[in-house]
Amino acid sequence: MKRVITYGTFDLLHSGHINILRRAKEQGDYLIVAISTDEFNALKGKKAYYTFEQRKMILEAIRYVDLVIPENTWEQKIEDVQKYDVDVFVMGDDWEGKFDFLKDYCEVVYLPRTVGISTTKIKKDLKEVAGKK
């Protein structure tokens, strides 16, 4: 069995998220998704709309996802790859090169992002709509 892992916040789920999850699953047989905890997001200066538990529940309902685990720190990736016997690490190409240190432990694949959609764009668009009311 070929195991794949990816990481993210996965807040305000959109078609770009589904695309990366589908394409990550195509890299193997079993997809593990590590999602940033609320505490880790706070350390990164981010605030998700949905709580960790809500985001976890949403991701667990997606057919491409086999397991959802918490991401608590930037440094846990090597440990996760080893603990879950991961063969392929997948991230969006906006992170290109940032995780090449994992090549000593598994294959590293950077997938193209879905053009025209992002959580940041959704939040910006919603703010603009709210401002016009």
Image (tube, rainbow, N blue to C red):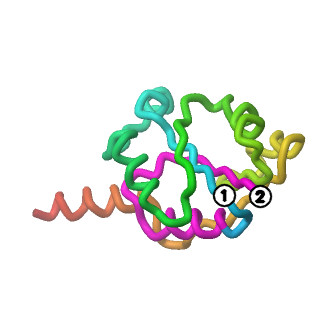
- How far apart are labels 1 and 2 at the CA level? 6 Å
Furthest residue to the left? 133
Give the structural element (helix, strand or loop) at label 1: strand
Q: Residue 116, how many percent across, how many down?
A: 49, 72
Mark 1 touching mark 2, by CB under 8 A?
yes
Direction from residue 64 to residue 86 in the image, left or right: right
- Report the front residue among 98 and 86: 86
Q: Residue at x 51, y 43 (%)?
A: 35
Q: Residue at x 50, y 66 (%)?
A: 63
Q: Which residues are magenta?
A: 3-25
Picture layout, residue 25 above or below residue 95: below
Q: Amino acid at mark 2?
A: Lys
Q: Residues within 10 Å of mark 2 (few under 14, many from 20)?
A: few
Q: On the rendered image, what quadrant is the C terminus found in?
A: bottom left
From the image, tell me which residue sits under label 1. Answer: 30
Q: Amino acid at mark 1?
A: Tyr
Of label 1 and label 2, which has the lower sequence position?
Answer: 2
Q: Residue 16, how many percent across, how many down?
A: 50, 67
Picture layout, residue 22 above or below residue 35: below
Q: Residues within 10 Å of mark 1 (few under 14, many from 20)?
A: some
* Quadrant in which residue 125 is drawn: bottom left
Q: Residue at x 37, y 56 (%)?
A: 12
From the image, tell me which residue sits under label 2. Answer: 2
Direction from residue 58 to residue 110 in the image, left or right: right
Residue 116 in magenta stretch: no
